[in-house]
Structure formats: structure tokens, C-alpha cells
Amino acid sequence: MSDKSAIEWTEATWNPVTGCDRISEGCDNCYALALAKRLKAMGVQKYQNDGDPRTSGPGFGVTVHPAALDQPLRWRSPRVVFVNSMSDLFHAKVRAMNRDLTFAGVIVLAPSEADESPTSEQKAVLDALHLRKIDLADRVVIVNPAGTSESRHGERSPTPRQPASR
């Protein structure tokens, strides 16, 4: 994570995941792939996992960095953050990691689709985690394509609101 960024529209970057795979011609000029190769050569720890040379490259294997997951919780002031500037947030391996972390009891907020329906046992675990997160929170805001919902501490049924028009 960098608290200062040369990117004009953001104040910081946060990369709890690094790496990607080329999937289209749009990936041919990927800055992150070139930068990962340079960071690997410099010995930066996050970029030592090589990806498949046919689809990725040196230092660009998809990797989760558990030590970076809670960094935003330690920030003392708000900031505009570029999340995962060095990875594909929607990569299949990232979705699998999110699922595994969730079942391990870690709270994961991820705007992704499930590949398969959870078993009834998994659903019970997820339901219990969801209710526990609500019990622990003073305020819960849920953002999805259907609109925004909000509830206050102790409420179990957020009231949907229409998305703001842009």
C-alpha cells in the first residue's frame, strides 16, 4: 500500500492481491505486468510469485497478501484509494480466495458472482456470519446494482433505496 500516489485521481493505492492473466488484446500494453517484472527484479516481496509465461509473467502470478488485508483498518483519516491497481479484482483465483476466506470466518466484501450455489451447510454458515456482522456493526450499507440499502445497529432488514441518478 502506498499512502501517496502519483496517480492524479487518487490519494493512495492498496493491493491486497497482485497478479493477473492476459485475456484479450487489451492486455497487450498492461502497465501492471511491466511494473511487476521491474518490482520482482528489485526484490519487492509481493512480486516474487511468477505467473504462467503464456498468460502472465515474472512477478505477476495471482497472489493474495494476507498481511495487507487489514491495512485500511489502520488508516487514521479518510482517503481516495485505488484498490488492486496491480491485479484483476475479478480473476477466478481471487473469487476462490474470497470464498475460502469467507468460510474461514474472515469478512470479505466482494462484488462478484458465485460460480455455484452454496450447499445448505455453507449457506447456514454464511447466514450466521451475515447476521453476526450486522450485530457487530453500528451501520451497514449494502451497495448492489438494484440500489443501496442501509440499516442501523440492531436492524435485521435493511430498507432498499433507489440508486442516486448521475
Image: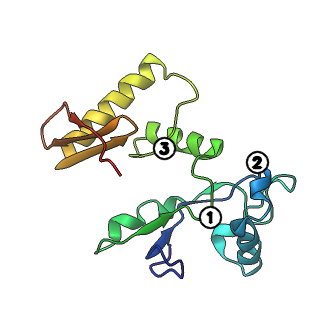
Whether residue 137 is visible here, answered yes or no, is: no
Left or right of 44, for residue 139: left
Using a 10 Å C-alpha cutoff, classify the residue at mark 2 as few (fewer than 14 neighbours), some (14 to 19) or many (20 or more). Answer: few
Q: Nearer the viewer, mark 1 or mark 3?
A: 1
- Residue 161 left/right relative to 72: left
The amino acid type of the residue labelled 2 equals Ile
SS assignment at label 3: helix
20 or 29: nearer the viewer:
29
Q: CA distance from mark 2 to mark 1?
A: 15 Å
**Can residue 80 be spotted in the picture?**
yes
The residue that disc 1 covers is 86
Q: Residue 15, position in %: x, y? A: 54, 64
Residue depicted at x 53% and y 77%: 7
Horizontal side of 79 relative to 34 (left or right) equals left
Instruction: Choose top left, top right, bottom left or bottom right for residue 96.
Output: top right
For label 2, the residue is 23
Labels 2, 1: front one: 2
Q: Which residue is labeled 3 in the image? A: 101
Q: Badge 3 local density, few (<14 within 10 Å), some, or many (20+)?
A: some
Residue pictured at 77% horizontal, 61% vertical: 50
Which amino acid, mark 1?
Met
